[in-house]
């Protein structure tokens, strides 16, 4: 039977197969047919009486490759039987699955069907002495999020705060001591004092702010601010086309200023008018800090971080010097600290060991920076709408139906906000923007117990990685009517049937928006207890800013910007919603009279 199987090896004579060695028969026996074929091919290449160098090299390359393929096949078999995820095979055992190709094309690497990010089942990956587990596929991802209660974020938060946000060592050491877990009630064997429960206290204050009573005042201030700003911009721009060198910067700056004003109050930017530059330069250099590149190799990157941190420190010193209780308004916020979130957590951090003003500035800069995804997503949504005149017309038709007429031209435009946030085409633009543009590695680590992911068990204290890009580009999970690397809102819309009696009776042919069918595949905000707490604000922020722009402005993307690409370089990929690789030049003018209800 083994010989019969070997006959399938193309190009090998029966005689050659009969003379193959006992080693290749052994491989045939264990099911590694390909390697057996290769060994047989090798004997055919041998000249009588010696081995040519070319033949030997060819053999070695072929043997390594086929061994690798055979191991992969074996992996699939083990995968169906076992419970501990198998290790992804590596060509060079000491190096593990060293992702050299990642350095040159990280997005291409994670989407390459042959490598570990695409494994169908949870898989262990070893790179040098490091190891982690990859989890992908909607059902596995749903199970991962469901089981995330058993995970700790402490090592990753500590890493990000220390490397990127410059949190001093004394404050960082608190993360190592916090063994109390993420729940309200600390682990019974934890010895950390309640005031030093940094992970739980920080997370609880974030949730109270962004998912609780802190959200409405923050949101209302943002909505007023962006409406006023874009109304003023409309006044400045006028009805003749004006050139702007970069749509992403134009939209990004407006949205960032309004978010900062709403978050930190009016003094933040008044005291630090150049903050936007250092903020975005910091953002572009994130990987430099995370990779631990020393300052003398990237002095400008570190100077930008210093400037951004100094801005936060200056704002907080001003708040400490000027704030009085009487400045607190009915919502609990005040103009010096902005949201009560910052004021309250300032007190909270000062209660903790190792925290001083510099440490608080690092923490708060991290919280401010977290809004960056929302801003970049807004710019992409607006880009994709104006790039497609048909889509622009659909969005405008929907949005105009939610406009509340204001008495005159000089009063800022108003909308029925709740209706606005239920518009199907608009929501589909938002969801498709995040599907296409959000590139992030969601990270989990089960802490005290092993983690069950369907039939698999991932041992405790092991890192689990789920790339959003893999989920968002999964051809088995998504509607492929248009290529997955193209922006297409149809992926999130369902249309009522067109030629049935029921449909003809129905007046309402509007599509329905839903993300239900792509649960576990649309994961821009992560999932489970530690999913993004800013998602409610982010959706509203992206929708309102987009709606204001399409209502107030005509924008023509100039030819060189029409096919703008995302920055998928090593420094640009994987940190969240992408930046564009280059500038996107546009012409902009006030939306022409009479078009408001086209
Ligand atoms: C489109 C916009 C946004 C996207 C795609 C996004 C995405 C994410 C993701 C993937 C995470 C990690 C979640 C996980 O591990 O499961 C996260 C965490 C976080 N996000 Fe967002 N985010 C967005 C907007 C915002 C905004 C506007 C804010 C604040 C105003 C914010 C604040 C945060 C914070 C504070 C965390 C860390 C939470 C923690 O440590 O527990 N995000 N975000």
Image (spheres, grey):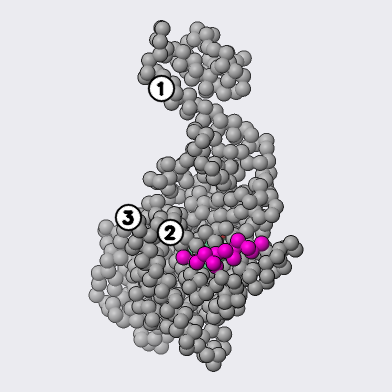
Identify whether 184 is placed above or below 518: below
How many numbered dots are placed on residues in this image?
3
The residue shown at (53%, 12%) is 20
Query: Mark 3 falls on what kind of element?
Result: loop
In the rendered view, does 570 fall on the left or right side of 562? right
x and y percent of residue 134 in the render? Answer: 56, 46
Q: Earlier in the sequence, mark 1 or mark 3?
A: 1
The residue shown at (66%, 55%) is 447
Mark 1–mark 3 distance (CA, rounded to whole Å) = 43 Å
Q: Quadrant of the N terminus?
A: top right
Mark 1 lies on residue? 58
In the rendered view, does 130 fall on the left or right side of 107? right
Query: Mark 2 falls on what kind of element?
Result: helix
| Marks 1,2: beta carbons within 8 A | no
**Do we see residue 262 in this rendering?**
no
Mark 2 lies on residue? 289
Mark 2–mark 3 distance (CA, rounded to whole Å) = 30 Å
> Which disc is residue 563 wearing?
3
Identify whether 519 is placed above or below 307: above
Task: Give the magenta part as a residue range.
Answer: 166-179
Q: Earlier in the sequence, mark 2 or mark 3?
A: 2
The residue shown at (38%, 45%) is 104
Residue most extreme to the right: 188
């Amino acid at each position: 039977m083994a010989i019969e199987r070997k006959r399938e090896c193309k190009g090998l004579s029966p005689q050659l197969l009969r003379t193959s060695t006992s080693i290749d028969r052994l491989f045939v026996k264990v099911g590694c047919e390909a390697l057996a074929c290769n060994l047989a091919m090798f004997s055919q290449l041998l000249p009588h009486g010696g081995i040519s160098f070319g033949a030997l090299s060819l053999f070695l390359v072929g043997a390594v490759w086929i061994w690798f393929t055979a191991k992969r096949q074996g992996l699939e078999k083990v995968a169906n039987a076992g419970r501990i995820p198998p290790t992804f095979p590596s060509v060079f055992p000491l190096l593990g699955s060293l992702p050299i190709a990642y350095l040159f094309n990280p997005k291409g690497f994670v989407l390459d069907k042959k490598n570990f990010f695409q494994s169908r089942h949870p898989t262990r990956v070893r790179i040098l002495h490091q190891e982690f587990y990859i989890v992908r596929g909607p059902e596995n991802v749903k199970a991962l999020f469901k089981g995330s209660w058993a995970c700790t974020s402490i090592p990753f938060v500590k890493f990000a705060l220390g490397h990127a946000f410059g949190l001093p060592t004394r404050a960082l050491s608190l993360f190592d001591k916090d063994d109390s877990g993420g729940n309200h009630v600390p682990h019974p064997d934890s010895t950390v004092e309640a005031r030093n429960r940094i992970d739980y206290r920080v997370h609880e204050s974030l949730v109270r702010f962004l998912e609780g009573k802190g959200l409405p005042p923050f949101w209302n201030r943002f909505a007023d601010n962006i409406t006023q700003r874009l109304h003023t911009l409309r006044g400045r721009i006028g009805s003749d086309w004006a050139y702007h060198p970069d749509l992403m910067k134009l939209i990004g700056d407006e949205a960032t200023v309004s978010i900062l004003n709403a978050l930190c109050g009016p003094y933040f930017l008044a005291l630090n008018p150049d903050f936007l530059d250092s903020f975005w330069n910091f953002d572009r250099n994130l990987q430099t800090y995370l990779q631990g590149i020393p300052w003398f190799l990237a002095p400008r990157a570190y100077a930008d971080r210093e400037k951004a941190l100094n801005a936060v420190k200056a704002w907080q010193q001003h708040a400490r010097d000027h704030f009085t209780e009487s400045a607190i308004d009915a919502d609990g916020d005040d103009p010096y600290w902005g949201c009560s979130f910052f004021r309250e957590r300032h007190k909270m951090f000062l209660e903790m060991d190792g925290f001083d003003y510099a440490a608080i500035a690092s923490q708060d800069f991290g919280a401010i920076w977290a809004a960056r995804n929302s801003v970049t997503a807004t710019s992409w949504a607006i880009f994709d709408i104006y790039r497609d005149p048909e889509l622009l017309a659909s969005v405008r038709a929907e949005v105009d139906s939610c406009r509340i007429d204001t008495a005159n031209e000089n009063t800022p435009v108003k909308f029925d906000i709740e209706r606005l946030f239920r518009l199907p085409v608009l929501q589909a633009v938002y969801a498709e923007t995040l599907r296409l543009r959000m590139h992030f590695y969601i990270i989990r680590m089960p802490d005290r117990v092993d983690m069950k992911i369907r039939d698999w068990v991932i041992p405790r204290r092991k890192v689990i990685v789920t790339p959003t890009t893999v989920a968002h580009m999964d051809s088995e999970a998504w509607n492929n009517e248009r290529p997955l690397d193209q922006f297409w809102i149809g992926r999130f819309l369902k249309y009522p049937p067109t030629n049935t009696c029921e449909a003809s009776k129905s007046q309402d042919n509007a599509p329905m928006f839903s993300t239900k069918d792509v649960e576990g595949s649309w994961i821009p905000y992560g999932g489970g207890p530690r999913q993004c707490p800013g998602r409610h604000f982010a959706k509203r922020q992206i929708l309102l800013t987009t709606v204001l722009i399409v209502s107030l402005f005509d924008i023509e993307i100039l030819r060189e910007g029409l096919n703008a690409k995302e920055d998928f370089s090593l420094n640009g990929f994987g940190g969240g919603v992408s930046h564009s690789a280059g500038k996107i030049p546009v012409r902009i003018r006030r939306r022409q009279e009479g078009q408001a209800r086209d």
